[in-house]
Image (cartoon, grey):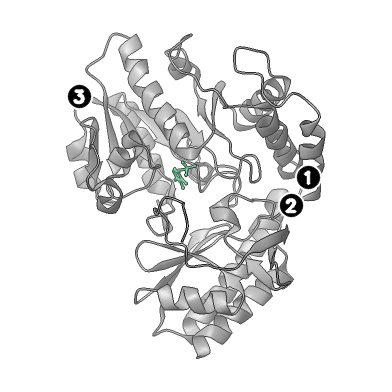
């Protein structure tokens, strides 16, 4: 009997007491290959040396100051992130849902502030994922997430890949289109580069803001810092979170200047967002990610991983339908509901996670080695052979 609110299906009963890189260890000393990493959160693996050191240093400094005060680590991280991503401003949050909420608020507020308050509707992909708050479940419109909860009126939806419907659902009231460049929870669905380009052009033509939710696919998960970069476009607002502080809660939104201008003093706030600890760790993550060779490593091991998985798909054509994704954001789509495969991978000490559309997701740490990938693919082969 647990006193914890029963909102999670917690099938894993092991007690993980130690983590190191790609591995988790139980209280009984058993070792698991963790290719979930907190669902794309621990981008540098468990307990990365530089992050542990940063956290210990940060522990001796003030833990909390409130955003009414100057937070040195926040200023430093904001400058680095904006300069690197070529955005003008960043606002901080504690989580992904909060980050998308801020992107929605800023988009609506922008048109309000330029005298177009009627432009206040957000167009999203049906059954996508942007978080679990009331606004973000309304944006995602996944029946499983929204059933029985208030559904906010300001959201319209189109089906993934349905260009005609997308154009049809745009009205004079549409202020923003909100998409994940690679849909995560919905089953690692990649929006093709030419579609992202087309979306950007459509937004420009109709005076609509483009919001790219990079919470899961961002931070090099796709192989580029942000997944939209593959299409050579620039969104107006980019919510990010998950991997930002390497496992510590943090998130935020990047803005182009004109949108940021609508968010004046008092229009938004957060008690904890951008705390010294979160920002210290966010800087530490950038220290590692911005070193030469980080991106090259991901692209190299990604190709290695995809080649191996496609070989496995060819070996088991009755089980596996498709291998999809980009970088180290990988989906294995099965023909049938894949729970039994997930369970067997786990029994063989490989941790993976499900998504919609019969997909099992694989999120190794971004610094994963080829040997660890071999270990993972060997477990997948061993499982499927049975
Ligand atoms: C995880 C996720 C969110 C929500 O993040 P939380 O930190 O759980 O609130 C939003 N959008 C996408 C694309 C995500 O993957």
Residue 194 place in picture, x, y as percent: 40, 47
Q: Earlier in the sequence, mark 2 or mark 3?
A: 2
Question: As displayed, is residue 184 above or below residue 352?
Answer: above
Q: Earlier in the sequence, mark 3 or mark 1?
A: 1
Q: From this viewpoint, is residue 26 visible?
A: yes
Residue 372 place in picture, x, y as percent: 70, 70
Where is residue 62, by image quadrant? top right
Q: Residues within 10 Å of mark 1 (few under 14, many from 20)?
A: some
Secondary structure at numbered mark 2: loop
Query: What whole-number distance in Å separates the C-alpha atoms at marks 2 and 3?
Result: 49 Å
Q: Residue at x 67, y 24 (%)?
A: 64
Question: Foreground: 194 or 157?
Answer: 157
Mark 2 or 3: in front is: 2
Q: From this viewpoint, is residue 291 visible?
A: no
Where is residue 28, by image quadrant? bottom right
Q: Residue at x 41, y 67 (%)?
A: 359
Q: Earlier in the sequence, mark 2 or mark 1?
A: 2
Secondary structure at numbered mark 1: helix
Mark 2, ligand 1, within 8 Å: the answer is: no
The residue wearing badge 1 is 52
Query: What whole-number distance in Å separates the C-alpha atoms at marks 3 and 1?
Result: 50 Å
Residue 385 place in picture, x, y as percent: 52, 90
The residue wearing badge 2 is 47
Q: Residues within 10 Å of mark 3 (few under 14, many from 20)?
A: few
Question: Foreground: 105 or 179?
Answer: 105
Query: What whole-number distance in Å separates the C-alpha atoms at marks 2 and 1?
Result: 6 Å
Q: Residue at x 28, y 39 (%)?
A: 138
The residue wearing badge 3 is 172
Asked whether, in this view, residue 176 is left or right of residue 323, the answer is left
Question: Foreground: 239 or 304?
Answer: 239
Whether pointer 2 and pointer 1 mark residues with C-beta atoms closer than 8 Å, the reply is yes
Secondary structure at numbered mark 3: loop
């Amino acid at each position: 009997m647990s006193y914890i609110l029963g909102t999670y299906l917690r099938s894993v009963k092991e007690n993980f007491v130690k983590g190191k890189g790609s591995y988790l260890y139980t209280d009984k000393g058993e070792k698991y290959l963790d290719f979930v990493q907190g669902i794309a959160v621990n981008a540098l693996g468990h307990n990365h040396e530089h992050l542990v050191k940063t956290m210990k240093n940060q522990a001796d400094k003030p833990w909390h100051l409130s955003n009414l005060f100057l937070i040195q680590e926040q200023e430093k991280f904001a400058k680095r992130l904006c300069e690197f991503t070529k955005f003008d401003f960043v606002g901080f949050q504690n989580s992904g849902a909060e980050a998308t909420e801020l992107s929605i608020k800023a988009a609506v507020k922008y048109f309000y502030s330029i005298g177009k308050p009627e432009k206040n509707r957000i167009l999203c992909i049906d059954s996508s994922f942007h978080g679990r708050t009331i606004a973000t479940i309304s944006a995602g419109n996944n029946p499983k997430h929204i059933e029985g909860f208030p559904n906010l009126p300001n959201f319209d939806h189109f089906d993934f890949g349905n260009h005609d419907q997308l154009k049809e659902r745009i009205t004079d009231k549409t202020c923003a289109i909100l998409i994940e460049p690679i849909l995560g929870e919905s089953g690692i669905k990649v929006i093709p580069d030419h579609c992202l380009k087309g979306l950007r052009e459509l937004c420009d033509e109709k005076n609509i803001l483009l919001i790219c939710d990079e919470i899961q696919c961002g931070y090099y998960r796709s192989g580029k810092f942000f997944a939209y970069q593959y299409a050579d476009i620039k969104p107006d607002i980019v919510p990010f979170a998950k991997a930002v502080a390497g496992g510590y809660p943090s998130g935020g939104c990047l803005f182009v200047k004109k949108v940021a201008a609508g968010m004046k003093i008092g229009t938004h706030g957060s008690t904890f967002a951008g705390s010294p600890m979160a920002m210290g760790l966010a800087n530490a993550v950038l220290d590692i990610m911005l070193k030469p060779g980080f991106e090259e490593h991901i692209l190299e091991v990604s190709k290695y991983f995809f080649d191996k998985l496609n070989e496995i798909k060819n070996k088991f054509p009755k089980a596996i339908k498709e291998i999809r994704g980009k970088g180290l954001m990988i989906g294995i789509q099965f023909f049938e509901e894949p729970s039994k495969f997930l369970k067997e991978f786990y029994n063989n000490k490989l941790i993976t996670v499900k998504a919609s559309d019969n997909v099992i997701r694989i999120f190794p740490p971004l610094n994963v080695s080829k040997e660890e990938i071999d270990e993972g693919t060997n477990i997948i082969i061993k499982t499927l052979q049975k």
